Image (tube, grey):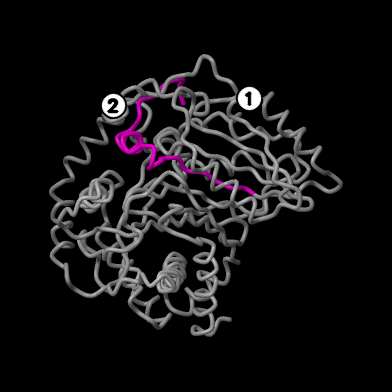
Amino acid sequence: MGRSRWASPLDAIFLIGESPETLMHVGSLLHFRYPEGEDDGFLRDLVADVRASPVEPPWTLRLQTRRLMRQPLHRWVEDERFDIDYHVRHSALPAQGGERELGVLVSRLHSNQLDFRRPPWEMTFIEGVGPGRFAVYTKIHHSLVDGYTGTRILQRGLSEDPDDRTHPHFFSLTRRPRVEGESREPVGDVASILRSVSTSVTSLPTVARTLVETQLRRGQTSTRAVTSYQAPMSILNGPTGRSRRFATQQYELERLRAVARARNATLNDVLMAICAGGLRRFLDDLASLPDRPLVAFVPVNVRAPESEGGGNYVGATLVSLATDVEDPLARLSAIASSSRAAKARMRGMGGDAVIAYSALLLAPAGLQVARAMSGLPLPGPLTLNVCISNVPGPTKPLYWRGAQLEATYPVSIPGHSMALNITAQSYAGTLNIGFIGDRESLPHLQRLAVHTGEALADLEREAGTA
């Protein structure tokens, strides 16, 4: 990666969308256990070592075009006055703190806007999490690094060897050289961005035909591909402020896989089903469950498996959550059917075509965002209610200078007319789910996390896998 680069069109969307109420940064909360015989002195030494280590792009890049955010052309350049002490912080929970206090701190940290005069990322080391444990909260603007790339950096920045005390830190890594013949992604230089735009334009007839076929199915059952106009109005679709609530859950991955095998579904189908079950109970408790099924906005990775990532290169689709269905197995079946129909629409498309199709499918959501921001009773149906994303993570236990990573929780983006974002990441046989929501729209977010666990137990019981 060079010392400067142009932002891709998708990167620019996250910069255009940045506002005091809609903060376009993503984060992660990592739980670590101290090496045997170590205590908080280990963490202080680790922080000191991090601050003394070299820092490589993209972590040294600031936004040259920050004074005019709402325009499509943005450029990242080297920050000649880069200050590692600004980006790396050390904090502690109150005495006798724990998971609740950690969630409050992360909620507060995630509510603060990044400073675009500097490279837009921060890392906070947190002690006092519990006996023998510490946490690290990192936030990065989505235009600089997307979730896929962040996961790959995590894998490369930690070691599988618990005795490794010299492995480079996350931001000391240089990007892997591109192998000859490897496909290029539309990030980094103007030529590749123009190639992406050109490819998208040439694929528009096919994309448009697919989109028209999808939209003509409007009004059919949830077993079909969801159109851009099927989402019901809900408390998830109002205006949002900048304050956030954050909650977490961790499950053994095999529990979800067992249900998937028993019901001829995918792991992602089961994830959406437990989220749907949790939302059904959560909204019902608030007397706010819509009569029609909620619709999930589901990001779709279009990178090649060997890609190291870079800027944003991701599509999206819409899936019915069947929250109007009471029976857990019938709800899972409806979600799986809707998901298969959505995937079938994109089958055979290249990455740029998937992105073009996604943009056209989601374009009507702009009206619901405008309606939420303005408070005006603008006409028109809704496109989506909630974002649910699943990011595959490391499969083996990882260590940071001997400290074992126990869990990695994503912290994503809620915004106007989408007050809730649920992102899951797999790690070493577990599925770690981060729930991030608008503080005013969604009271008691931890209850949603608890209801999600109850929904998984219901599915296991009905599927006979408990």
Horizontally, residue 5 falls left or right of residue 93, namely left
Task: Please state the extent of the stretch shown in magenta in the rendering.
Answer: 1-30
Task: From the viewer's side, name the closer residue of 184 and 310.
Answer: 310
Q: Amino acid at mark 1?
A: Asp
Determine which quarter of the picture holds residue 211.
Answer: bottom left
Residue at position x 16%, y 68% from top? 217
- Lower sequence index among marks 2 and 1: 2
Residue position for label 2: 73
What amino acid is labelled 2 in the image? Leu
Residue 430 in picture, x, y percent from top left: 60, 61
Query: Residue 50, position in %: x, y?
Result: 68, 30
**Within-10-Å neighbours for mark 1: few <14, some 14–19, many 20+:** some
Tell me how far mark 2 sits from mark 1, CA to CA. 30 Å
- Give the residue drawn at x 47%, y 55%: 423
Task: Find residue 194 and report its horizontal and vertical position in percent.
Answer: 25, 30
Q: Identify the residue shown where x is 70% and y is 41%.
A: 92
Q: Is residue 265 left or right of residue 97?
A: left
The answer to whether 88 is drawn above or below residue 274 in the figure is above
Judge by depth and name the residue closer to the eye, 277 or 93: 93
In the rendered view, tell whether residue 170 sits above or below residue 409: above
Residue 31: which numbered mark, if any? none
Q: Choose top left, top right, bottom left or bottom right for residue 336.
A: bottom left
Q: Secondary structure at mark 2?
A: loop
